[in-house]
């Protein structure tokens, strides 16, 4: 991918690519797992820069709370107390799954691909 | 998860070195009824995040174990956790499993006396094979040995579940007086109360588990972490069931749900039994040896329970980095995994709901 701007995203992408092509092949077997984790972490960080964290749960929270009132922590507490449930919000499970897909697009797109979900 | 609390519970300790094991020699001689025990060599093995493993080459003179032996000494790591049984309690569980005929590395001796090597430890026989989950599920020979291996595993699970609470047996493990699945949910909620993040999807899954908990299929010994990665395989045969630190009394189906959970198939998703075989192969081995038979249909609940439990544990593992300051990339990345298990759990609930089995 050609970088549009020489910023954090482009740098992280280049570091990950350089690490994979120039450094990883030089490592012994005892460091391969660590190296794979490092490359994975760089990819996650790069993808996270491309999205606003608050936006990930926005649709879910917007469907349940008045504009801007809810947080994921509040929703977690309301689900545990029984205030928010399938009866009060029939689309709850569907919306929770959609918000997880948003998170997984950043954290593990391969997980989604294995389940036939577009990321 | 008996105590889902990951606060560091012990102060950091100096690393062990080979010289430390010299102090073990007279103690081992007494424990084993030998005239003399010499630790000829000690090598630190690649270990887990929670404990150290040392290979000990030992010469025993006199007594029932006279001869040369290769043993593994397992100790707590510098910072141990409250999530698991202490080393001595785990050793007692392994002794009971060994006596019940379960394939474990033979338990040799254990002590919580910190005067010996500065920390609690347990010694077991060295067992051949690999326990690496990724290596096992990608073994080119899996097509040949996978189904039979799953049958062996089913048998081992049945032998574990044949151990039931009775006087004098593992009395330090609490026997559930309420529904064991609901008790798991309550313990997970308690653990999550101290977590850095509150997750709506996980709370939804826990609410579902609470509302849909089945009557227990009995109260038996439950290994608590029996999955691919926690048993040794040598030339396609099971050689030992490892890692008993989550052992507890509970519903035996909990172990089977944990074994087949998608998160423990290491990418071999179509091989439901731990990424190595068909579910039927595991259940055939289990049901041929178990007092209470288990059907595939009743396991969906326990797959959801397993996914929730691993989601909760992984969140708390991430907190060891983000809250407790352990500088580990593996812990940090594990802390990012909860949405994977939450999605799988919700997907199973979706399928059950579509079949009209549950709400």
Image: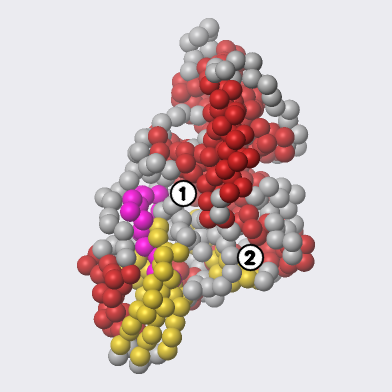
B352 on left or right of B162: right
- Residue underneath mark 2: B153
- Main secondary structure of the magenta stretch: loop
- As helix, strand or loop, the secondary structure at mark 1 comes to loop
Residue nearest the observer in this picture, B300 or B337: B337
Residue at image coords 45%, 78%: B70
Give the x, y percent position of residue A112: 69, 33
B133 or B223, nearer to the observer: B133
Q: Nearer the viewer, residue A1 or B355?
A: A1
* Residue at x 26% of width, y 63% of height: B118
Alpha-carbon distance for marks 1 and 2? 21 Å
Circle 2 — which element? helix
Q: Earlier in the sequence, mark 1 or mark 2?
A: 1
Dot 2 crowding, Cα within 10 Å, few <14, some 14–19, many 20+? many
**Chain containing the residue with disc 1:** B
User: What mark, if any, has residue B1 been given in the picture?
Assistant: 1
Q: Are marks 1 and 2 on the same chain?
A: yes
Q: Is residue B203 above or below residue B111?
A: above
Q: Which residues are magenta?
A: B72-86
Q: Chain of mark 2?
A: B
């Amino acid at each position: 991918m050609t970088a549009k701007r020489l910023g954090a995203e482009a740098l992280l992408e280049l570091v990950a690519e350089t690490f994979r092509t120039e450094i990883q092949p030089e490592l012994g077997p005892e460091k391969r797992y660590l190296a794979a984790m490092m490359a994975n972490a760089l990819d996650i960080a790069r993808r996270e820069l491309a999205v606003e964290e608050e936006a990930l749960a926005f649709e879910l929270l917007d469907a349940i709370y008045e504009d801007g009132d809810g947080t994921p922590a509040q929703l977690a507490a309301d689900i545990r107390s029984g205030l928010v449930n399938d009866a009060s919000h029939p689309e709850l499970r569907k919306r929770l799954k959609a918000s997880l897909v948003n998170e997984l697009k950043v954290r593990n797109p391969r997980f989604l691909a294995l389940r036939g979900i577009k990321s | 998860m008996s105590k889902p609390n990951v606060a560091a519970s012990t102060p950091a300790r100096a690393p062990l070195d080979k010289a430390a094991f010299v102090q073990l020699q007279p103690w081992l001689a007494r424990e084993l009824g030998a005239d003399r025990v010499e630790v000829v060599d000690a090598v630190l093995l690649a270990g887990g995040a929670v404990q150290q493993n040392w290979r000990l080459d030992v010469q025993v003179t006199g007594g029932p174990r006279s001869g040369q032996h290769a043993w593994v000494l397992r100790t707590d790591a510098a910072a141990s956790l409250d999530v698991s049984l202490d080393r001595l309690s785990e050793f007692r569980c392994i002794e009971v499993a060994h006596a019940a005929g379960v394939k474990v590395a033979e338990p040799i001796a254990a002590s919580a006396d910190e005067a010996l090597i500065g920390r609690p430890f347990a010694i077991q026989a060295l067992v051949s094979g690999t326990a690496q989950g990724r290596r096992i599920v990608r073994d080119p020979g899996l097509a040949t040995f996978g189904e039979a291996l799953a049958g062996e595993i089913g048998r081992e699970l049945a032998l574990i579940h044949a151990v039931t609470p009775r006087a004098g047996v593992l009395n330090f493990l609490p026997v559930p007086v309420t529904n064991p699945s609901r008790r798991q949910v309550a313990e997970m909620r308690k653990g999550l109360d101290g977590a850095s993040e509150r997750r709506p999807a996980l709370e939804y899954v826990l609410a579902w588990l609470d509302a849909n908990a089945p009557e227990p299929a009995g109260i038996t010994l439950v290994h608590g972490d029996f999955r691919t990665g926690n048993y040794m395989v040598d030339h396609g045969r099971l050689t030992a069931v490892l890692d008993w630190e989550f052992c507890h009394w509970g519903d035996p189906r909990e172990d089977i749900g944990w074994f087949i959970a998608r998160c423990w198939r290491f990418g071999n998703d179509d091989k439901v039994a731990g990424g190595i075989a068909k579910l039927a192969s595991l259940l055939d081995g289990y049901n041929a040896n178990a007092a209470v038979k288990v059907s595939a249909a009743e396991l969906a609940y326990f797959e959801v329970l397993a996914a929730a439990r691993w989601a909760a544990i992984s969140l708390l593992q991430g907190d060891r980095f983000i809250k407790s300051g352990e500088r580990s990339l593996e812990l940090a990345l594990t802390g990012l995994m909860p949405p994977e298990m939450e999605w799988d759990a919700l997907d199973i609930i979706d399928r059950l709901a579509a079949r009209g089995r549950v709400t």
